[in-house]
Amino acid sequence: MARDGAASRVRLLAAAAVEFAQHGIVGARVDRIAASSGVNKAQMYAWYGSKDGLFDAVFAAQLHGIVDAVPFDADDLPGYAVRLYDSYLQAPELVRLASWNRLERMPTGDLLVGHDELSEPKFAAIARAQADGSILAGLRPDEVYSLVIALAGTWSPVSATFTASAADSEVDHQRRRAALRLVVARALVP
């Protein structure tokens, strides 16, 4: 029976994404990833070199999902923030992976450095909306984007104060969505 290397890599990256999202780079265990994926450790190391190399591959594979989980709409920043809130409920592992990358790899600076194709279109859309008067002028577009992401993450899986869950009541979710919509609108929409 021939082995399917592509399918094995897919299983490995999926199992590693779960492990890294839950435990971070330092806390992740290669033995658990190997057992969960059905890929032996020797093959894992041959493909990715190390646990760190495997994390880098997982993060690269998940980056578009992390940044583009929700289509960006500069003309509706409050709605965008609410849709991000909902995406964090549906795919908390994406936020966790980004946070582990921030904590263990890149404690300062732009998380998307070297990935201008992901951020520049959003910044350009914000600049256009600022020129049109639909987003508050006087702030850099990248800072507007950062503020919206931060506000949307108020109840995210990595919140320092309160983490929402998909299992919370719809009344709670509606209240949070309304608060988020209101705050983003008042802060960034003239």
Image (cartoon, rainbow, N blue to C red):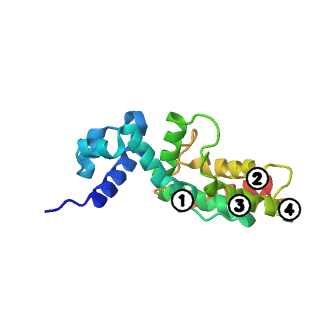
Residue drawn 69% across the image and 65% down it:
73
Query: Secondary structure beneath disc 4?
Result: helix
Disc 2: which residue: 141
Say which amino acid is labelled 2. Answer: Pro
- Disc 1 from disc 4: Cα separation: 29 Å
Nearer the observer: mark 3 or 4; the answer is 4
- Disc 2 from disc 1: Cα separation: 22 Å
Query: Secondary structure beneath disc 1?
Result: helix
Which class describes the residues within 10 Å of circle 4: few (<14), some (14-19), or many (20+)? Answer: few
The first of marks 1 and 3 along the sequence is 3
Q: Residue 10 at what x, y percent from top left? A: 34, 57
Disc 3: which residue: 78
Q: Residue 100 at what x, y percent from top left? A: 49, 40
The first of marks 4 and 2 along the sequence is 4
Give the quadrant of the N terminus: bottom left
| Image marks 3 and 4: residues in contact by CB distance under 8 Å | no
| Image marks 1 and 3: residues in contact by CB distance under 8 Å | no
- Disc 4 from disc 2: Cα separation: 11 Å
Query: Secondary structure beneath disc 3?
Result: helix
- Disc 1 from disc 3: Cα separation: 14 Å
Which class describes the residues within 10 Å of circle 1: few (<14), some (14-19), or many (20+)? Answer: some
**Which quadrant holds residue 7?**
bottom left
Answer above or below: position of 39 versus 87: above
Disc 4: which residue: 131
Residue drawn 23% across the image and 51% down it:
38
Residue drawn 27% across the image and 42% down it:
32
Nearer the observer: mark 1 or 4; the answer is 4
Q: Residue 172 at what x, y percent from top left? A: 57, 56
Disc 1: which residue: 87
- Disc 3 from disc 4: Cα separation: 18 Å
